[in-house]
Image (cartoon, helix red, strand yellow):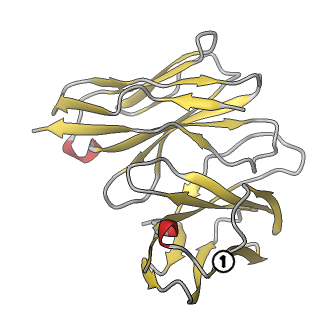
Amino acid sequence: DTEVTQTPKHLVMGMTNKKSLKCEQHMGHRAMYWYKQKAKKPPELMFVYSYEKLSINESVPSRFSPECPNSSLLNLHLHALQPEDSALYLCASSHQTLRGGPNSPLHFGNGTRLTVT
Amino acid sequence: AQTVTQSQPEMSVQEAETVTLSCTYDTSESDYYLFWYKQPPSRQMILVIRQEAYKQQNATENRFSVNFQKAAKSFSLKISDSQLGDAAMYFCAYRRGSGGGADGLTFGKGTHLIIQP
């Protein structure tokens, strides 16, 4: 069982649709991440939230809009996507310290398989 | 920028035998962490083992161990007594240690491990 829960597992949407991906963790982690993974490729970092504030945006197109409403939840709002955005979207979380210090591994969810038609 | 290189796109091993997956990385940082993750067809990224760069002792986790050569920037994974459940894509990943734990991971391209019964 994964400690990071992503919903939905699968999503098919048209290019004019608006949809959201959801991610939830209850491990007390204060860093949360969105990754995009194409088939047979490694995950690519999209966004990082640190203490509910966006700390890293890897030049992601504005049709992807992240949101972190509280320390346990992370959303990814999707609008006007393109077929090439079809991929597996992975959420992850990890411990974080404000002053640096011990690093912890990322805990990943099972992902949302997104298909844009 | 950091880079992670996995030179073996695919490896095959007989059940119960030992296999070594290679990984090299490039960084100018002195403080960093290295990880091996596996991703089975179920899609979830599962942490296999991690190594802190400041530790000289190689990490071990049951049948999994690493050979960490800091000067050579090499971080290989050895799987002993291979089992059918070890079949997966294996990703080597790097994370710098000075970011307080919210930098995300830089992944290699992955090695597809096949276990022959």
Q: Residues within 10 Å of mark 1 (few under 14, many from 20)?
A: some
Above/below status of B77 relative to A7: above
Q: Which quadrant is home to the N terminus of chain A?
A: bottom left
Residue A77: image location, x then y, percent = 65, 80
Above/below status of A4 relative to A67: above
Q: For the residue labelled by badge 1, is the local secondary structure a helix, a strand or a loop?
A: strand
Residue drawn 62% across and 31% down? Answer: B3
Q: Residue furthest bottom?
A: A17
Residue A32 seen from this side: yes
Residue drawn 20% across and 29% down? Answer: B13
Residue A2: image location, x then y, percent = 47, 65
The residue beneath circle 1 is: A75
Residue A51 seen from this side: no
In this orientation, which residue lies closer to the viewer: A19 or B23?
Answer: A19
In this orientation, which residue lies closer to the viewer: B13 or A99?
Answer: B13
Q: Quadrant of residue B29?
A: top right
Residue drawn 75% across and 75% down? Answer: A68
Q: Is residue A1 left or right of residue A73?
A: left
Q: Is residue A98 left or right of residue B9?
A: right
Q: Is residue B37 left or right of residue A18?
A: left
Above/below status of A61 relative to B41: below
- Chain letter of mark 1 equals A
Q: How many marks?
A: 1
Residue B31: image location, x then y, percent = 76, 27
Q: Is residue B1 left or right of residue B117?
A: right
Residue drawn 46% across and 69% down? Answer: A86
Q: Tell me which amino acid carries mark 1.
A: Asn
Q: Residue furthest top?
A: B71
In this orientation, which residue lies closer to the viewer: A68 or A81?
Answer: A81
Q: Which quadrant is home to the C terminus of chain A?
A: bottom left
Residue B111: image location, x then y, percent = 37, 36
